[in-house]
Image (cartoon, coloured by chain):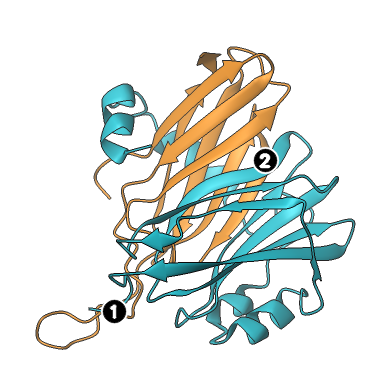
Chain colours: A cyan, B orange
Amino acid sequence: MHRRDFLQAFGSATALAPLVVAGLLSPGAALAVSFNRAAFDAKTAADALRLIGAASAEASRDILLKAPEVAENGAAVPIEVVSSIPGTTRLSVLIDKNPLPLALQFNFAPEAAARFQAKLRMAESSRLRVVAMAGGKHYTVFREVKVTVGGCGD
Amino acid sequence: MSEPTKIRATVKGSDGEVRILIPHVMESGLRRDPSGQLLAAHYITSLILSLNGRPVIESALGTAVSANPLFAFQLQGIKVGDKLSVAWLDSKGQKGGAEASFSAA
């Protein structure tokens, strides 16, 4: 979906924002498993994978990773991830060749489907990796994405 | 961060579709200005979605999330009128968020 459509469709329906913020952001208060923030500072995908506990993740066909084969604009590469692995509680995305490969992690409560869409910055053509955690085990899938204009540097 | 966080929350059957747009610079700390100076990092580090006051999706974000991030999620067992709130925190300690009720798709 284009950002313009979103803005047109929803206008300024939600101006009541600041009220909800206060109590919600105490770290670790929400769902059971907390994040290892150090993994976001890792400079290689291997280090990031190790720090999120997924160094020995098993390849899986049950994770869908939709991403363009060729991304013209590395500043906003749209991806969609859907895990069909039962009991998926966390999804993580890594971009191997970014200066800081770990892009994001989501934890899902049972009310939330283990799926999301997001837009990511890619510095250059790279392997894009998703790791799903389910029942304490890690599963992974990857795709190569070619980037014509990088989105991290100048 | 003057523009508010926007949420669209719609229900189809019992599935709730959520779209979130957060106007934010998401500066990675890796870019340089025209004079060659590094631009200071300023990006959203965490985002929490709550359903009727209970956290259901919690996230940690890094510098690879695009500027003005747009996210889509799906929640299950949703009824029209259920309340969704979004709260975020960035690397400079600034906070933002929004609240919406699920409406029929």
Percent x, y of residue B4: 31, 39
User: What's the amino acid at mark 1?
Assistant: Gly
Horizontally, residue A26 falls left or right of residue A87, namely left
For label 1, count other residues whose C-alpha is less than 10 Å away and answer few (under 14), some (14-19) or many (20+). Answer: some
Horizontally, residue B31 falls left or right of residue B71, namely left
Which of the two marks, 1 or 2, is nearer to us in this view? 1
Percent x, y of residue A85: 82, 48
Residue designated by label 2:
B55
Query: Can the viewer see residue B63 in this picture?
Result: no
* Disc number for residue A153: 1
Tell me the residue at 40%/62% (across/down): A70
Q: Which corner quadrant of the image does residue B14 belong to?
A: top right
User: What's the amino acid at mark 2?
Assistant: Pro
Tell me the residue at 57%/84% (across/down): A42
* Residue A75 sits above or below residue B8 on the image: below
Percent x, y of residue B73: 58, 38
User: Is mark 1 in CB contact (under 8 Å) with mark 2?
Assistant: no
Q: Tell which subunit mark 2 falls on.
A: B
Given residues B50 and B26, the one toward you in this image is B26
Horizontally, residue B68 falls left or right of residue A115, namely left
Of helix, strand and loop, which one carries label 2?
strand
Percent x, y of residue A141: 69, 63
Horizontally, residue B97 falls left or right of residue B13, namely left
* Residue A119 sits above or below residue A100 on the image: above
Tell me the residue at 69%/78% (across/down): A49
Given residues A11 and A117, the one toward you in this image is A117
